[in-house]
Amino acid sequence: MHDLAALEADGVTATFVASTEFVAATDAQARALGFAAVPAVYVAHPIQDRTDAEMAALADEALPRVLAAVTRGSSES
Amino acid sequence: MTTVLDPTDESRPAARTVGSRPEDLTGRTVGLLDIAKPRGEVFLDRLAALLAERGVTVRRYAKPTFTRPMPADLRAEIAAECDVVISALAD
Amino acid sequence: MQSVTTTASSPSAAAQDLPADGLVVVVKQDCPTCRLVAPVLGALDAVDAVVYSQDDPAFPDGVAVRDDTALDASTALGIDVVPTLLHRAGGAETARVEGWDRDRWRELSGVADLGAELPEWRPGCGSRTHDPAVADELLVRARGHLLAARRVELAGLEDEAEALYDRGWTDGLPVVAPTPPRVLRMLAGTTRAPDEIVAVVPPNLVPATVEKVAINAVLAGCRPEYLPVVLAAMEAACTPEFNAHGLTATTWGAGPAVLVHGPIARRIGVNAGGNALGQGTRANATIGRALQLVIRNVGGGRPGEVDRATLGQPGKVGLCFAEDEEGSPWEPLSASRGVPPGASAVTVFAAEGPRGVVDQISRSPESLARSLARALLGVGHPKLAPGFDAMLVLAPEHVAVFAEAGWDRARFGAELDALLLRPPEELARGADGIDEGLAGPTQPQPKFRPGGLLVAVAGGGAGKFSAVLGGWVGGRGGSSPVTRVIEEA
């Protein structure tokens, strides 16, 4: 969240991908940094015990939402 | 918590907002920032491939540790080289 | 710091409850003198004295005490010291004793043997209303309703300086957070109502209230006593003649500068002496900055948006100084700008950064005038005349050369005008191998339009150096200097 705020301040369009476990923590930190909302993308928890194929499937599934978070158009979602 | 009075004409929202987004990623450089959590690089490898298929220029970066904000030189490097950055994967 | 006792006119619940007649005592437990007089307060019960305690409603023990931990009664009564004994009649105060003074307490209470066991006299302690943290809270409680601006909460993890910068409210330098207590203290610097419209601010033509100007004055780092100068400068800068919209939008780098005239300059500390155009004096550093921040924040004149300056210059952060009217041998500039003698005023003018002019040799006024004229020809471009306005700041050692030769301000101006009337062959395009210049001039041309050169006296005692501040296109197509008397000064 600090990284996102810093990069946005530098004029870079930023988003981050986190597991669903992080929704509450991210919202709290966003508010603490003065943001009303942040364009985060959440994928299903857990992460660390997944196989490579499962991780790739997560990325496939997340892609439209990642694109939507960093562009104005509705992208491919 | 500090309360301040708005010095402006109040035509803009009071909360911080993220900057305006590009229309699409055509011709943009996208940085993929690995925050150094296990398995994140696998996710980013796949994302890099998917973006490259769409004609996006992809650059890869890695934070030394997910426990701290990124170092200033990494921030400057990304800001100089990228239009868009996607960091992953917080778990 | 503004004394919170000035808020006594605000009717609060406690003020309504104040006894209209009789004796009132205000104490706090955390004061040795109050603890000393505690036994006396029991005796005053007999004469129906009302006791308020500022910190501990159980103090003094055994006496009927009114809880004034919220300090409403203390504020309404204007308590500066505890203990205070006062007498009221018909809702108004008729007598007051601060600290312990046996004879006067006896006189006021009519109790002849009051405090026989106590010393004759002990000084009191400071009232809790003057505790800085409490004073801010009281100020907001009493006068916060006057503030209409949107309140913005800075979040817990936001660094204050970063948060204000990130919201786009600064000129790039750190600003002072405009908290409600600071803005209320700033507003105490003017007699004008917070909701009064000061000016309609270019480029977006947004009406600015006294409150909005005060908020930006806090951001800029002004002290409350500067506010009347900032308000007058705002009024001057937002006139059609000054044309702040054009000055903001032009690719030329000049910005609005403020010259302060009259006794207010010395009173609030606007520097007219050494380093008058430089750093180190708070009034000089912040008054011009406040004007620029209002144009930015209220008017919407931001670099990269409406402000299209090719290069800009550091004076655009803010430029303010005063004429050294007391040190000058000449009539002040303000006299020719319609300011009555003894009045205070501001002149807002378009200015680039100052450029020094060296002449350490000339002893005659004729020679020195020629030096200065030569330097003034460089404003904008030596071959463009008339074109841009300018301000000439004469340092004391230079103006003395003219004064000792008997040249007054009018004579100097006339001599300079003659030197600045340039022949057409010097100004024509192509002349001197320079394409820039006037197209086909046939008559001599004045470097400055009538009224386009202002001359002020300022600077330190040593140094045969004056300064030229180039301006912008003068007159209808550009900007004219505008002077405003500071009515409330």
Image (spheres, coloured by chain):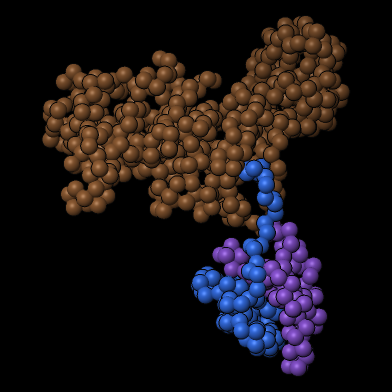
C353 relative to C98, above or below: below
Q: Which chain is blue?
A: B
Task: Confirm whether residue C399 shows in the render.
Answer: no
Residue C364 appears at what percent x and percent y? 13, 27
Vertical placement of C115 versus C451: above or below? Answer: above
Q: Is residue C391 left or right of residue C6?
A: left
- For the N terminus of chain C, which image quadrant? top right
> In the visual, does C62 lie left or right of C293?
right
Q: How many marks?
A: 0
Q: In this view, does B28 lie above or below C361?
A: below
In this view, B41 is above or below A70: below
Residue at 47%, 51% in the rendered image? C308
User: Quick check: can you spot residue B19?
Assistant: yes
Based on the displayed image, in which of its 4 quarters is residue C176 positioned?
top right
Q: Residue C242, how many percent across, how many down?
A: 47, 33
Colour in which the image shows chain A = purple
Along the line of sight, the residue nearer the viewer: C105 or B27 = B27
Q: Quadrant of the rendered structure where residue C269 is? A: top left
Depth check: give the residue in front, B15 or C55: B15
Q: Where is residue C191 in the image (x, y as percent from the top left)?
A: 60, 22
Residue at x 32% of width, y 31% of height = C449
Q: Is residue C7 left or right of residue B71?
A: right
Picture colour for chain C: brown
Q: In which quarter of the image is residue C27?
A: top right
Q: Which residue is drawn at 82% across and 10% down?
A: C21
For the point 69% across and 39% down, which residue is it?
C149
